[in-house]
């Protein structure tokens, strides 16, 4: 009996993680406040609701400068939405102390001077993010982990589905999909509005992404922890983002044993050999050793 070790292939390759490029931070600005919450876009400017200052700031997206201010309508401002004519602002505490709160309140306010034009009960007890889809409002609820579509005339729920994570707060609508930020997972999700299914997951730009809005091309996010406004790419030409680079060495060894009385004169061996792919790149030539 004779054992023949005759083929040794060594391949060095570089495997990398495979991600959609959505989520790249294009620019960031320092905020004029320290408790940023709701965020929306009116077609020209970004508007930011701050919880502590009880103000709504108008910010130029070209430079991050504050253009003007409006008074916030409630005690504890959160989500902010623009319906093309008026602002809608969530008040988490419903305008009363925490101990007496039963349900949040949503205010319809004038963009001219902040005058309260209407008040409706929120469709949930703990509303946070707010977005406008062209007909209805959407909000996130951080305790029930829900995303709710509701009628802005009276707060009636149209439909709801489970949020993609347990602390979903920021909310934006891009004309087709919902974007939701989660502060515990530090992720942003793109959701189908019919089923609530997650289509894309990307990293959040900060550790407490609290508000989102869409300007027609880019996603904007405010972070409650580092007090910054981020401009984020969601439609990059690149199909993949390569991260977490590391090198690896792979060795293929084939051992053949001849159990017959005759002499083995030839043998064909076929091995599947790695090649360049979207998630790996061969960085050295394949070396063959025979003995």
Image (cartoon, rainbow, N blue to C red):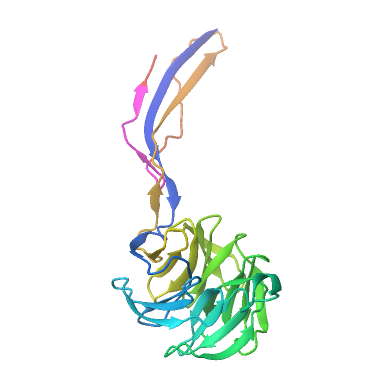
Residue at 50% in and 77% down: 80
Q: Position of residue 269 (x, y in %)?
A: 46, 26
Magenta portion: prevailing SS class: loop
Residue 166 position by quadrant: bottom right
Q: Which of 85 and 232 is in front in this view?
A: 85
User: Considering only vertical position in the picture, is 185 above or below 230?
Assistant: above
Quadrant (top left, top right, bottom left, bottom right) of the N terminus: top right
User: Considering only vertical position in the picture, is 168 above or below 62?
Assistant: above
Q: Where is residue 192 in the image (x, y as percent from the top left)?
A: 56, 70
Residue 132 inside the magenta-drawn segment: no
Q: Position of residue 281 (x, y in %)?
A: 36, 41
Residue at 47% in and 78% down: 175
Residue 167 position by quadrant: bottom right
Q: Position of residue 128 (x, y in %)?
A: 57, 71
Q: In this view, does 57 lie to the left or right of 138?
A: left
Q: Is residue 183 left or right of residue 163?
A: left
Residue 280 inside the magenta-drawn segment: yes
In the rendered image, the residue lying farthest to the bottom is: 117
Report the span colored magenta: 276-288
Q: Nearer the viewer, residue 3 or 73?
A: 73
Q: Can residue 137 be seen in this view?
A: yes
């Amino acid at each position: 009996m004779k054992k023949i070790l005759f083929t040794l292939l060594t391949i060095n390759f570089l495997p990398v993680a495979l991600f959609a490029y959505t989520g790249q931070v294009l620019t960031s600005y320092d905020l004029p406040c320290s408790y940023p919450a709701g965020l929306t876009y009116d077609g020209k400017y970004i508007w930011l609701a701050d919880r502590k200052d009880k103000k709504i700031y108008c910010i130029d997206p070209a430079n991050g400068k504050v253009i003007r201010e409006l008074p916030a309508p409630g005690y504890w401002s959160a989500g902010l939405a623009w319906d093309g004519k008026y602002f809608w602002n969530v008040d988490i505490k419903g305008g009363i102390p925490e101990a007496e709160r039963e349900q949040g309140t949503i205010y319809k306010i004038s963009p001219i001077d902040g005058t309260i034009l209407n008040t409706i009960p929120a469709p949930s007890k703990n509303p946070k993010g707010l977005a406008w889809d062209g007909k209805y409002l959407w909000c996130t609820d951080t305790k029930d982990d829900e995303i709710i579509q509701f009628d802005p005339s009276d707060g009636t729920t149209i439909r709801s589905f489970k949020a993609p994570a347990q602390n979903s707060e920021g909310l934006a609508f891009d004309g087709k999909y919902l974007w939701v930020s989660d502060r515990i997972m530090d992720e942003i999700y793109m959701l189908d509005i019919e089923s609530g299914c997650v289509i894309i997951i990307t990293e959040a730009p900060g550790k407490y992404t609290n508000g989102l809005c869409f300007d027609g091309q880019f996603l904007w996010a405010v972070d409650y922890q580092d007090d910054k406004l981020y401009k984020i790419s969601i439609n990059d030409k690149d199909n993949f983002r390569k991260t977490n680079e590391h090198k690896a060495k792979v060795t293929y060894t084939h051992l053949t044993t001849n159990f017959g009385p005759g002499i083995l004169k030839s043998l064909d061996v076929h091995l599947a050999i790695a090649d360049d792919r979207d998630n790996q790149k061969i960085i050295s030539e394949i070396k063959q050793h025979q003995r």
